[in-house]
Image (tube, helix red, strand yellow):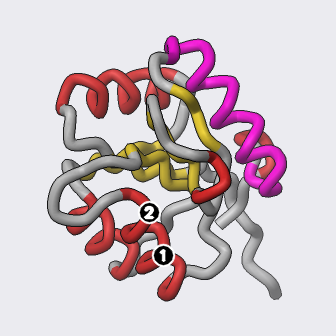
Amino acid sequence: MTAALTPREPTILVVDDDPLLRELAARVLRRGGYVVIEAADGLEALAHCKGTGLIDLVVTDVRMPRLDGLRMAAACGAHRPNLPFLFMSGDADPATLSGPLLAKPFGPAKLAATVRELLTREGLGREGTTE
């Protein structure tokens, strides 16, 4: 007999060295029903990517100390090649990114809609996720 797959909410890793922006993004996404993990910089995020925990999407700032979002995404991609990224920046060139760009400043509704659209495109919409 096969065990039934149980629905689960997508898990999003939010990475930003600005604690106010990180907390705001995390709060918006939690209110949207997502499980959220927070990281203060690229090195902390990379540790989560290398861990065994399930991450469905990384929402990350581009410019951060110690390890920026671009290098963190490349390093995470080595461990999880299909992991999607949503980059947040006020001045990054979209051509240099390995995922879509959410231009700063943005509001809570724009963040929620962009994440929902990206997860749906990745086949991870809230209603259809299984573990």
Chief secondary structure of the magenta span? Answer: helix
- Quadrant of the rendering where the N terminus is positioned: bottom right
In the rendered structure, are the residues bearing label 1 and label 2 in contact, judged by CB atoms less than 8 Å apart?
Answer: yes
Residue at screen point 57% across, 25% down: 111
- Quadrant of the rendering where the C terminus is positioned: bottom right
Residue at screen point 61% across, 40% down: 101
Q: Which residues are magenta?
A: 106-124
**Crowding at label 2, few (<14), some or many (≥20) Cα neighbours within 10 Å?**
many
Residue 80 against residue 30 in the figure, above or below:
below
Question: Is 127 one of the magenta-colored residues?
Answer: no
Left or right: residue 82 versus residue 50 is: right
Residue at screen point 59% across, 57% down: 97
Residue 70 position in % (x across, y down): 44, 63
In depth, the one of 93 and 16 nearer the eye is 93
Residue 70, label in figure: 2
In this figure, which residue is indicated by the disc labeled 1?
74
Residue at screen point 67% across, 31% down: 114
Disc 1 from disc 2: Cα separation? 6 Å
